[in-house]
Image (spheres, rainbow, N blue to C red):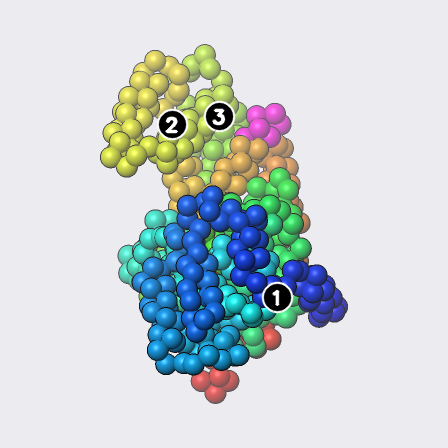
Amino acid sequence: MATEILKKDEAKKHEDTKQKTPIPESLEKIEKYFKDKIGLGDSFDLGVRKLKVIKKDVHLYYVNGLCDTQYIIEIMEQIIRINEHEKLSTNMFQIVENHLVHQSVKPIETLDEMVDQVLSGLMVVVIEGANQALTVDVRSYPGRQPQEPDTEKVVRGSRDGFVENIVVNTALTRRRIRDERLRFEIIKVGERSKTDIAVAYIKDVADTDLVSIIKKEIQAIKIDGLTMADKAVEEFLLKQGYNPYPLVRYTERADVAATHLLEGHVLIYVDTSPSVMITPTTYFHHMQHAEEFRQSPAVGTFVRWVRFLGVILSLFLLPLWFLFVLEPHLLPDKLAFIGPNEHTNIPIVVQLFLADVGLEFLRLAAIHTPTPLSTAMGLIAAVLIGQIAIDVGLFVPEVILYASLATIGTFTTPSYELSIANKIGRLMLLVAVAIFHAPGFVIGATLYFLFLSRIRSLNTPYLWPFLPFNPKAAWQIIIRTSVPGDKIRPSIVHPKNRHKQPANS
């Protein structure tokens, strides 16, 4: 079925190409088209260089800010030298093509494609009398160098990370997987932005149906532009609605992306974004971190358990403590000290919400505050706001303590998107406990797990391998196994080749 859909899409694409305007033989008509359509002569960054080669006109079109000027100069020198070595010929197109000293030269046949290539940063060479043009990839996008992502730091490990350039990002992945079966299929999306999107997978590992579905959904995106890059693509791809839980995993680390490719996942690279989307994913994919795999299995398991504990605290600590405040008889005698020793005029539930939302204010302020000022802001928040709020009776000390512990658990969650979703879940549980007390906590937690169990990411159960239960995969979630012992790819991605290592290894 997926193959038939792809064939229909390719046929439709072919029909659309037929209807596009062919490249005229007259260079004056081409120049007029560029002036009328893309503002040649009005926009200062659009350039054209006109040359005379063997009594024929040759025009070079480019965008200044997206091209490497040195490459353009070298190519022009090679074209001009044709006058010294060639005589008048009817096959001028082939002569120019042979003299373009570059590894990436491609003929095109329509004006629409010509405009797209110029605006993508390529240089287009048109020759008088030819109904074709030549594109030369002289792109040099402005951007930064690969560096370690701020959100996925490790003590030991590589320090290179993805950047906003899709060519650099695919190269970082190729450097780690030098397999002839690795594929990067490019798709342009956006009527105005014409954003490059690459679908990456290993041909003999990834599920063909999954690849087909993702490509079909991306090709079906109809929008002016993808200025928000990968996030906009995700919303078209998964139609998440108002479900706060992330259905794809984002990573800025090339080693993490390569690992998931080898497991059979399909990755989506979007130009202008330093993040790569990993599909499909489960709840526990968002709980993994590269640090676990840069340490020994024992240390990695310990780090994983600590992280799991932090996530559990971020979800249930505040609602559970509030339940014990409301119903202290549920506590055993040895834990009877839990609960506020002081009384204030403000209800505890209001204090909890104020503290939780206040900590969210501080997190947002830290993000938007310039780095030299963020430390000072943190000191003001911790010393002045926190302590004075307790002294004046706005909060009891225990509220600040448990709200802080829950927030620290939020920060231990590797996925930023998952941590925010868990915060929303925590607030919902607080409301349930405030209204219904103990039954509210039990029913709220049950509904929470039922909600997670109903989520599916590209037809993948969100709580796999626990729902449905898969013993071997569940063991690998709980225990960080050693690399020699990890021989089977996860079944959730339906890999064609389940074995990571040869059977006799």
Q: Which mark is residue 353?
A: 3
- Please give left or right for residue 450 compared with residue 8 in the image: left
**Stretch of the chain drawn in magenta:** 430-437
Q: Are marks 2 and 1 in contact (CB under 8 Å)?
A: no
Give the secondary structure at mark 3.
helix
Mark number, residue 211: 1
Q: Which residue is mark 2?
A: 400
Q: Amino acid at mark 1?
A: Val
Which-is-in-front pick, marks 1 and 3? 1
Q: Amino acid at mark 3?
A: Phe
Residue at position x 45%, y 85% in the image: 505
Look at discs 3 and 2 and give the one toward the viewer: 3
Can you tell which mark lies on residue 200? none
The answer to whether residue 197 is above or below residue 245 is below
Q: CA distance from mark 2 to mark 1?
A: 48 Å
From the top left corner, tell me how far across and down residue 474 is, in percent: 53, 62
Q: x, y percentage for residue 277? A: 51, 56
Q: Taken as a whole, is the magenta stretch helix, strand or loop?
A: helix
**Mark 1: few/some/many CA within 10 Å (<14, 14-19, 20+):** some
> Is tag 2's residue or tag 1's residue first in the polypeptide sequence?
1
Cα separation between marks 1 and 3:
44 Å
Quadrant holding the N terminus:
bottom right
Disc 3 or 2, which lies upstream in sequence? Answer: 3
Numbered disc 2: secondary structure = helix
* Residue at 69% over, 65% down: 18
Mark earlier in primary sequence (1, 3): 1
* CA distance separating discs 3 and 2: 11 Å
Point out the residue furthest to the bottom here: 504
